[in-house]
Image (spheres, helix red, strand yellow):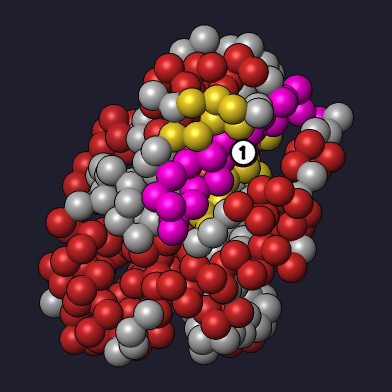
């Protein structure tokens, strides 16, 4: 993987009108945003546009060494004249930190809350849908616009991994037939071999376990809830979480002076369950009622996969 040269170089100055596919997140970029930005920039280039991927934040553990070894390019610095396509994100306040909202030409996202805002500004160019992975929307754009046969193997690999990661291997309720159809087509193009899904999740877990503190800090979002002003919320999907949960001192990592409380959500893929811890019992009790879980030894266990984005509405209602 390489980063393109400085955007102020002579070559860059010869191309003043560029569209950038941007993954801008909450302090990190995950595999879905990473894949969407890389692949959509490729689609724009297939349509004879000057386009690049721009990633605004560090890459988290979902982007494994095997993914990092792919020969793909991205930048971390936009040009003043760029227009923007935002992928895997639609929060205007977060986007405003990176790009002027009047320079946004398209939005692709599967998170909730800002559909009306973007529909009023962009109409059909705002594709915000309740779907397992934003990567599914990007692959559908390739097909709809007639470039399914033109996608590179690298982009197909990235989008396939993003779908598997964001649907947690289809254990998440929001994943559906569109995600499954997209994955089947991408796996065929990418030539992914048997057991690639298990190998991917094992690699994610290995990367987290090698440096838990860095992995947690690089993958934590800060939210405001009625009871607290700032809550650190970490989430990870692991093939087998038991050993990790026994050994990592989450309180010393997540409990900082900058936050009022912390909560983490650990999805165990092998068991198909969700295990949640927090330093505040009220959040665990609220989630217990919402998702029919059981609390034991300060840990809430839910017998199915529930992701952070599904928990937030219940935590934000006061």
Viewer-nearest residue: 54 or 66: 66
Residue picked out by circle 1 = 264
Please identify the quarter of the rendering in which residue 154 is found: bottom left
Viewer-nearest residue: 229 or 252: 252
Q: Residue at x 25, y 70 (%)?
A: 183
The secondary structure that dominates the magenta segment is strand
- Left or right position of 139 against 317: left
- Left or right position of 47 against 298: left
Q: Is residue 69 visible?
A: yes
Image position, residue 212 (x, y; %): 74, 57
- Left or right position of 108 against 11: left
Report the span colored magenta: 258-279
Image position, residue 247 (x, y; %): 75, 51
Q: Is residue 157 above or below residue 289?
A: below
Please identify the quarter of the rendering in which residue 243 is found: bottom right
Which residue is situated farthest in the front direction here?
A: 296
Q: Is residue 246 above or below residue 160?
A: above
Any magenta on residue 29?
no
Q: Residue at x 55, y 64 (%)?
A: 62
Viewer-nearest residue: 91 or 120: 91
Any magenta on residue 262?
yes
Image position, residue 9 (x, y; %): 66, 82
Q: How many marks?
A: 1
Image position, residue 88 (x, y; %): 42, 52
Q: Residue at x 61, y 85 (%)?
A: 2
Q: Is residue 45 visible?
A: no
- Left or right position of 21 against 187: right
Q: Residues within 10 Å of mark 1 (few under 14, many from 20)?
A: many
Q: Residue at x 35, y 55 (%)?
A: 167
**Secondary structure type for disc 1:** strand
């Amino acid at each position: 993987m390489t980063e393109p040269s400085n955007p102020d170089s002579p070559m860059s100055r010869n191309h003043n009108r560029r569209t950038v596919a941007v993954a801008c997140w909450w302090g990190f970029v995950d595999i879905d945003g990473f894949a969407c930005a890389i692949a959509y920039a490729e689609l724009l280039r297939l349509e004879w546009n000057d386009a690049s991927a721009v990633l605004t934040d560090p890459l988290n553990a979902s982007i494994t060494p095997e993914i990092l070894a792919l020969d793909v390019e991205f930048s971390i610095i936009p040009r003043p004249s760029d227009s923007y396509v935002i992928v895997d994100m639609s929060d205007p306040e977060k986007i405003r930190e990176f790009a002027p909202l009047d320079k946004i030409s398209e939005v692709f996202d599967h998170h909730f809350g800002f559909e009306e805002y973007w529909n009023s500004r962009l109409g059909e160019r705002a594709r915000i849908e309740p779907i397992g992975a934003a990567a599914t929307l990007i692959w559908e754009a390739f097909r709809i616009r007639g470039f399914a046969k033109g996608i590179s193997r690298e982009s197909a690999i990235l989008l396939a991994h993003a779908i598997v990661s964001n649907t947690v291997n289809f254990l998440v309720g929001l994943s559906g037939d569109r995600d499954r159809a997209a994955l089947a087509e991408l796996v065929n193009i990418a030539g992914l071999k048997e057991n690639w899904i298990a190998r991917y999740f094992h690699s994610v877990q290995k990367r987290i376990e090698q440096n838990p503190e860095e992995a947690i800090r690089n993958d934590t979002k800060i939210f405001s809830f009625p009871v607290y002003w700032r809550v650190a919320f970490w989430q990870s999907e692991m093939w087998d979480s038991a050993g990790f949960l026994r050994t990592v001192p989450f309180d010393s990592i997540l409990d900082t002076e900058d936050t009022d409380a912390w909560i983490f959500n650990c999805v165990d893929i092998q068991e198909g369950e969700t295990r949640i811890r927090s330093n505040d019992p009220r959040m665990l009790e609220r989630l217990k009622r919402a998702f029919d879980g059981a609390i034991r030894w300060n840990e809430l266990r839910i017998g199915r996969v529930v992701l952070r984005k599904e928990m937030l509405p219940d935590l934000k209602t006061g």
